[in-house]
Image (tube, grey):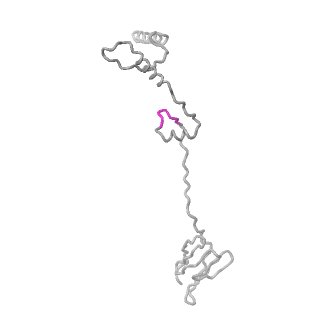
Amino acid sequence: MNLRWLFLCLALAVTAWLSLGGESGTSDAVSEAVVRPAQVRGASLRPSAAQRMQAESGLLRLQVRPEPAPLGDAQSLADLADKEPPIFHYQSWDPPPVKVVAKVEPPKAPAWPYVYLGQQFGQGEWWVYLTLGEETRAVKKGLILDQNYRIEKIEPPTMSVTYLPLSELQTVTIGAMK
């Protein structure tokens, strides 16, 4: 146990020495790249005046930077989106908005409003008796009810009716032949 404490205290002392200024060789200065012309064998170590001018002009060209576009400009943001995305782009941790896709269904005919009372075969065609509230009607093929429904055909056990505003064919069960 004493050996373990000795190693722990030694590690603590080394850590404290390094964090409080142990190494004096580090500095807070920022290093930048310097453009130097290529050295030719046999050439003097001191650059000529032309080489110095070329090196200085190269450094000046490196220092010129285009002015960044303002962040709020919509056109610049659209141009930026068309190009390759930057390395450090804005990222939001909010979940993406839910896309609501509204399914537009075509209009449908309303439910058949009449109640079937009975049927009769007379004068060579079928007659069907219907009621709507307290009103009773006798209909045959080709008749129009309330300017909304046209009786297309009556063939027991079904009757075909067209809802005129939408031209939608509906089939109504009227029972078997009697």
Residue at the left extreme of this rendering: 41
The foreground one among 69 and 119 is 69
Residue sitting at the far right: 134
Q: Is residue 88 magenta?
A: yes
| In this picture, residue 140 sits left or right of residue 84 | right
Q: Residue at x 53, y 43 (%)?
A: 96
Residue drawn at the location 49% of the way across and 15% of the way down:
29
Q: Which of the 4 image quadrants contains residue 41?
A: top left
Magenta segment, which residues?
Answer: 85-91
Q: Quadrant of the C terminus?
A: bottom right
Residue located farthest toward the bottom when viewing the structure as drawn? 123
Percent position of residue 56, x then y: 45, 19
Q: Percent from the top left, x then y, of residue 82?
A: 49, 42
> 34 or 54, which is in the foreground?
54
Q: Is residue 59 magenta?
A: no
Residue ID at (46%, 38%): 84
Count of numbered badges drawn on the protein: 0
Residue at 60 percent of width and 73 percent of height = 164
Residue 83 x/y as whole percent: 47, 39
Q: Quadrant of residue 95?
A: top right
**What's the magenta bit mostly, secondary-structure-wise?**
loop
In the image, taking residue 112 as reference, residue 21 lies left or right, namely left
Residue 132 is situated, as x and y percent measured from the top left of the image, at 65, 75
Quadrant occupied by the N terminus? top left
Relative depth, front residue between 176 and 164:
164
Is residue 122 or residue 45 the one in the foreground?
45
